[in-house]
Image: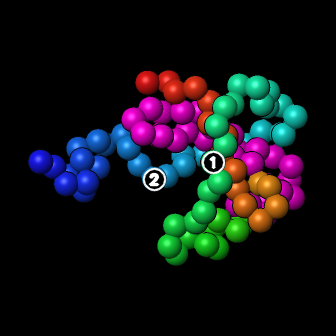
C-alpha cells in the first residue's frame, strides 16, 4: 500500500498552487464558462501576499486568469476578489 505522501509525490501534476496566467477587466470574462467556485485561503506564511493580491484585484476591478489542478485535471480558472476572500471559479477540465 502507498501512503498519502507517496501518492502525492507520484502525481507530478497535482499541486496546491494557483498559477496566474494574466489579468483582464472584469466585464471581459463570460462567467457562464466557469462552473465550481472555491474559497481560497493563504498557505502558512502567505497571508501578506494573499492580502496584497486580493486588494489589487479589488481596487483595479480586474480578474486573474489562472490554471489550477483539481484532483487530476487541469482547469482554466478565474480568480476574483470578493470582500475579505479570493474566490477561484474553475472551468471544465482540459486533461
Q: Which mark is residue 9?
A: none
* Residue at image location 84% in from the left, 40% down from the top: 26
* Residue at image location 58% in from the left, 65% down from the top: 42
Q: Is residue 74 above or below residue 44?
A: above
Q: CA distance from mark 1 to mark 2?
A: 13 Å
The picture places residue 5, in percent across and down from the top left corner, at 25, 56
55 in magenta: yes
Instruction: Report which quarter residue 58 is drawn in.
Output: bottom right
State the extent of the magenta-drawn residues as a range. 53-80
Frontmost residue, 2 versus 81: 2
Q: Is residue 84 left or right of residue 66?
A: right
Is residue 9 among what the camera can see? no
Instruction: Report which quarter residue 41 is drawn in.
Output: bottom right
Q: Main secondary structure of the magenta part?
A: strand
For mark 1, what is the residue? 38
Q: Is residue 87 above or below residue 83?
A: above
Q: Secondary structure at mark 1?
A: strand
* Residue at image location 87% in from the left, 34% down from the top: 27
Q: Is residue 18 above or below residue 32?
A: below
Q: Is residue 45 above or below residue 12?
A: below
For mark 2, what is the residue? 16
63 in magenta: yes
Q: Residues within 10 Å of mark 2 (few under 14, many from 20)?
A: few
Residue sitting at the far front: 1
Q: Secondary structure at mark 2?
A: loop
Frontmost residue, 10 versus 36: 36
Image quarter where the C terminus lies is: top left
Amino acid at each position: 500500500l502507498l501512503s498519502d505522501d507517496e501518492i502525492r509525490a507520484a502525481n507530478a501534476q497535482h499541486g496546491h498552487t494557483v498559477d496566474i496566467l494574466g489579468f483582464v477587466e472584469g466585464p471581459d470574462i463570460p462567467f457562464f464558462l466557469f462552473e465550481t467556485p472555491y474559497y481560497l485561503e493563504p498557505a502558512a506564511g502567505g497571508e501578506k501576499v494573499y492580502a496584497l493580491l486580493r486588494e489589487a484585484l479589488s481596487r483595479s476591478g480586474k480578474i486573474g486568469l489562472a490554471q489550477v489542478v483539481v484532483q487530476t485535471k487541469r482547469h482554466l480558472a478565474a480568480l476574483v476578489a470578493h470582500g475579505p476572500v479570493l474566490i477561484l471559479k474553475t472551468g471544465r477540465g482540459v486533461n
